[in-house]
C-alpha cells in the first residue's frame, strides 16, 4: 500500500514524505519531480510554454503511474488531489494523507514567494488555500496536523500505518 501525501504548497509534503520514507523503509517519489524528469522541463516552464491544462494532463498520467508503484511514499503537487480523476487514479492501492497546515504556517514556510508565483498576491493565495482545503478533505483517508515539525508529522503518520 502506497502512502500519498497531499496538501497546499508549503504544507511540507516533500520534507515529510522523505522523512516518512526513511522511517518506514520505503521508497519516496514526488509527482512534480516525476513530471520534470519525464519531460526534461521545469514545471514553471511547462506552465509558461503550454499552459495549465497541458500540465494537468501530464499530472494525471503521472498519478496513474504513481498508483502502480508498491510500498512507496508519494508526495503530490499542491493541485493534484483537487482533481477527482487524479484522486481516483492514485487511490488504487494507496491511502491519501492530507497535511493540514494553517495558512499562517504556510506563509512562514513559503517566505518571499519568489519561487511560488501563486503567492505574489496573498489574498488570492488565501482564497485558493480555502478552495483547495475542502477538496483535500474530500480526497483524504487521514488528516494530520501539518503545522508540526516534519519529523513529528512523519512519526505520527507512520503510527497510523503500523
Image (cartoon, rainbow, N blue to C red):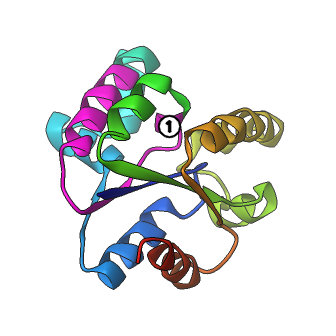
**Who's the residue at 33% across and 31% down the image?**
89
Q: Is residue 67 above or below residue 11?
A: above
Q: Where is residue 28 drawn, in percent x and y?
A: 27, 64
Q: Secondary structure at mark 1?
A: helix
Local packing at callout 1 (Cα closer than 10 Å; few below 14, some 14-19, many 20+) is many
- Seen as rendered, the residue at the extreme front is 162
Q: Where residue 153 appears, x then y in whole percent?
A: 57, 76
Q: Residue at x 67, y 77 (%)?
A: 148
| Front position in the image: 26 or 30 | 26
Q: Is residue 113 left or right of residue 83?
A: right
Magenta-highlighted residues: 55-81
Asked if residue 75 is positioned above or below residue 40 in the image, the reply reads: below
Between residue 76 and residue 135, name the one nearer to us.
135
Task: Please tell me whether residue 25 is drawn above or below residue 6 in the rendered image.
Answer: below
Q: Position of residue 17 (x, y in %)?
A: 41, 67
Q: How many marks?
A: 1
21 magenta-colored: no
Q: Tell me if I can see residue 120 in this picture.
A: no
Residue tagged 1 = 81
Task: Work out whether residue 78 can be spotted.
Answer: yes
Is residue 54 shown above or below 7? above
Percent across and percent down for residue 162 are: 40, 78
Amino acid at each position: 500500500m502506497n502512502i500519498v501525501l497531499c496538501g497546499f504548497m508549503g504544507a511540507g509534503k516533500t520534507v515529510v514524505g522523505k522523512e516518512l520514507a526513511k522511517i518506514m523503509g520505503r521508497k519516496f517519489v514526488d509527482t512534480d519531480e516525476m513530471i520534470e524528469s519525464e519531460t526534461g522541463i521545469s514545471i514553471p516552464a511547462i506552465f509558461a510554454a503550454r499552459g495549465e491544462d497541458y500540465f494537468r494532463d501530464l499530472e494525471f498520467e503521472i498519478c496513474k503511474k504513481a498508483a502502480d508503484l508498491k510500498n512507496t511514499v508519494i508526495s503530490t503537487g499542491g493541485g493534484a488531489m483537487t482533481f477527482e480523476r487524479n484522486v481516483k487514479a492514485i487511490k488504487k492501492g494507496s491511502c491519501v494523507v492530507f497535511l493540514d497546515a494553517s495558512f499562517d504556517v504556510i506563509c512562514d514556510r513559503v517566505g518571499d514567494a519568489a519561487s511560488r508565483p501563486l503567492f505574489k498576491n496573498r489574498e488570492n493565495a488565501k482564497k485558493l488555500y480555502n478552495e483547495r482545503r475542502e477538496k483535500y478533505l474530500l480526497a483524504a483517508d487521514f488528516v494530520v496536523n501539518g503545522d508540526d515539525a516534519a519529523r513529528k508529522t512523519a512519526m505520527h503518520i507512520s503510527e497510523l500505518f503500523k
